[in-house]
């Protein structure tokens, strides 16, 4: 499935939290005016555009620091709160 031009398919094995973080990052890119491209984000991070695509899709970036770097580049804040009880 594609969302805003990005492949929203997540690799098996990603946690729901990881998936939500990556989706929030893609949405943050889409909501920017003008829209933040992978190429611009790559330049800000000092990495290639294909590396950004891999980070956003979950094919790469299991190192928590890479997610923190992406959040910083997108001006996003990660909020930690207790899980809802079922």
Image: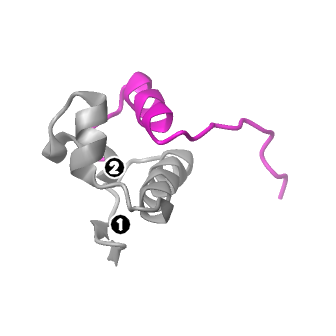
The residues tagged by marks 1 and 2 sit, at their Cα atoms, a distance apart of 9 Å
Front-most of 4 and 75?
A: 75
Marker disc for residue 8 = 1
Front-most of 42 and 10?
A: 42
At 42% across and 23% down in the image, what residue appears?
Answer: 65
Give the position of the C terminus as an image quadrant: bottom right
Q: Say whether residue 84 is left or right of residue 67.
A: right
The vertical placement of 50 against 29, above or below, is: above
Mark 2 highlights which residue? 56
Front-most of 31 and 5?
A: 31
Instruction: Tell whether position 68 is magenta.
Output: yes
At 26% across and 45% down in the image, what residue appears?
Answer: 40
- Farthest residue toward the front? 34
Lower position in the chain sequence, tag 1 or tag 2: 1
- From which residue to which does the magenta span run? 58-86
- Farthest residue toward the bottom? 1
Residue 80 location in percent, x, y? 72, 35
Is there any visible trace of residue 85 in the rendered image? yes
Residue 35 location in percent, x, y? 38, 62
Label 2: how many Cα within 10 Å (few below 14, some 14–19, many 20+): many
Q: Say whether residue 36 is left or right of residue 38.
A: right
Element marked by disc 2? helix
Q: Say whether residue 52 is left or right of residue 15.
A: left
Give the position of the N terminus as an image quadrant: bottom left
């Amino acid at each position: 499935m594609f969302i805003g031009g990005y492949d929203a398919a997540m690799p098996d094995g990603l946690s729901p939290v990881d998936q939500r973080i990556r989706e929030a990052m893609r949405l943050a890119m889409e909501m920017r005016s003008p829209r933040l491209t992978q190429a611009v984000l790559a330049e800000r991070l000092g990495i290639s555009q294909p590396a950004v695509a891999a980070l956003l899709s979950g094919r790469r970036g299991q190192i928590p620091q890479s997610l923190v770097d992406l959040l910083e580049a997108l001006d996003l804040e990660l909020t930690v709160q207790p899980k809802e009880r079922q």
